[in-house]
Structures are given as C-alpha cells and as structure tokens.
C-alpha cells in the first residue's frame, strides 16, 4: 500500500492539468465537473490508503491536527483561509454560489478551496512519511508541463485550438480555461525544471510559458 501511495499524488499532479470534457463547443462548466469528480475520487481513495497504511489511526487523533498544523504554517494559513471562505459565504449575496461557485465562476467556491487544501494536506503527510514522493511529484510536474508546452506550440503555430474553437488571439489554452491559467501551471513546471537543473526542460518550458504571454488577449469567446 505504501508503494502505491508513493505514486498516488504524483499521478494526480500528472493527470489533473490534462483533464477536459470533450465537447464540440468548449463548455468550461463540464471541464470543472470532470476536475471536481476526479479530485474527489483521489481524495477518498487517498484517505482510505492512508488509513490502511496506518491501522492504528483513531478518530481521537483529529484533536492533534491543530498542533500538527502549527508546525507547518503554510498549511495552517491555507486552512484558515479555507475556513474563512466557508464561514463568510453566509454573508454573500448568494450564499449557495459562494459555497459551490456559480456557473459563470466555473465552480470556484469555498468548497473547492476546502478540497484543494485537503489535497495539499494529504500530499504533505505523504511527503513527510516517504521522501521519495518529492522527486516523483517533480517528475509529474515536468511530464505534464512538457506535454502542455508542446501542444501550446502546436496551437500557436497552427492558429487553431486543440480543444474547442477559439480565436488565435486567445491561444494557447490547450486544456485550460485561459492562457493565463496555462501559463501559471507552466510556471510551476518551470520551477521544477530549475530545481532539478535540467537545461533542456527549462528551455522547452520557458518557450511554452512565453507563448502564453506573447499574444494580445488573455481570454475571449469561441469563434
């Protein structure tokens, strides 16, 4: 089980940026639904795997969670932010949309924040127990980043979106809702390449990242 857990979250990092819902006219709401259910599946199975790997775990151990988070200030701040987002959603103009996200906001609500912070916490637990998870995570970032950089180049050179039908001015997007989002992920992958001191991957990822900054518009309607 522990060997499976070593590759569980790297698999999520590799798969998540490549997910999309295959529609003729790109509907980002369906893309979000795919990301949501895949993420929930990874979390449920990840928690189950941790419980199997630690059979002595008891519900009473939750009381020590805050002390554990205090020693990890980044995660502590992330959880405080998530709890703040949930608690303040009551005072929003539309509390339901504040929790779940509106269709226009592609689901980026308070519960999505909680889900992402939960994943970050599970990844942190796994990395602390198994140091070999870290290089595997970095390789997952690099692998997905390389795929996205190649497809971004194809989109810009061909002036045609790989998924959907978008104007050339808003390319590249590949599987992301905008080239700004794509550029953000390629920036993470570039950081992994710099950390591993791989000059070839640094070059390819830098070119891919540059393409997301080189055209006039960031987002726009389909053709």
Image: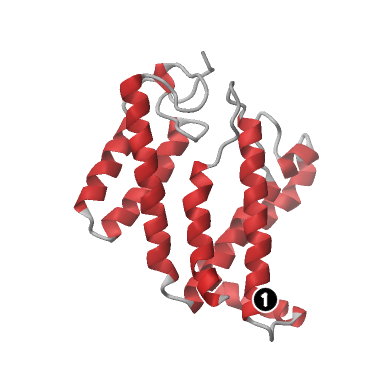
Is residue 114 in sight in this rendering? no
Is the image coloured rainbow, by chain, by secondary structure, or in one colour? secondary structure
The residue pinned by badge 1 equals 51
Residue sitting at x 71%, y 81%: 61
User: Compared to 162, does 117 lie above or below?
Assistant: below
Residue sitting at x 41%, y 67%: 134
Which of the 4 quarters of the picture holds residue 131? bottom left
Question: Which residue ends up furthest to the left in the rendered image?
Answer: 199
Question: Which residue ends up furthest to the bottom in the rendered image?
Answer: 56
Within 10 Å of the Cα at label 1, are there few (<14), some (14-19), or many (20+) other Cα atoms? Answer: few
User: Compared to 12, does 63 lie above or below?
Assistant: below
Looking at the image, residue 116 sits to the left or right of residue 148; the answer is right
Looking at the image, residue 163 sits to the left or right of residue 56; the answer is left
Which of the 4 quarters of the picture holds residue 154? top left
Residue sitting at x 50%, y 57%: 11
Q: Residue 139, image x and y in percent? A: 37, 58
User: Compared to 10, does 126 lie above or below?
Assistant: below
Q: Residue 100, image x and y in percent? A: 73, 42
Element carrying mark 1: helix
Looking at the image, residue 20 sits to the left or right of residue 135; the answer is right
Is residue 24 in sight in this rendering? yes
Q: Quadrant of the N terminus?
A: bottom right
Residue sitting at x 69%, y 86%: 56
């Amino acid at each position: 089980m522990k060997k499976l857990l070593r590759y569980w979250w790297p698999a999520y990092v590799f798969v998540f940026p490549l997910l999309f819902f295959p529609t003729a006219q790109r509907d980002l709401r369906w893309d979000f639904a795919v990301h949501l259910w895949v993420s929930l599946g990874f979390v449920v199975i990840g928690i189950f795997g941790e419980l199997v790997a630690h059979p002595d775990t008891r519900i009473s151990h939750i009381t020590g969670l805050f002390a554990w988070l205090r020693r990890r200030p980044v995660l502590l701040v992330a959880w405080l932010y998530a709890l703040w987002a949930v608690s303040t959603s009551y005072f929003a103009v539309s509390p339901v949309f504040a929790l779940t996200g509106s269709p226009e906001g592609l689901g980026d609500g308070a519960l999505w924040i909680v889900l992402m912070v939960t994943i970050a916490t599970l990844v942190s637990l796994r990395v602390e127990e198994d140091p070999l998870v870290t290089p595997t995570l970095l390789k997952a970032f690099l692998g997905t980043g390389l795929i996205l950089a190649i497809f971004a180049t194809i989109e810009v050179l061909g002036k045609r979106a790989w998924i959907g039908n978008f104007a050339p001015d808003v390319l590249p997007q590949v599987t992301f809702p905008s080239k700004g989002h794509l550029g953000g992920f390629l920036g993470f992958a570039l950081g992994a390449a710099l950390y591993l001191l791989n000059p070839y991957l640094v070059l390819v990822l830098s070119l891919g990242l540059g393409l997301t900054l080189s055209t006039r518009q960031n987002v726009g309607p389909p053709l």
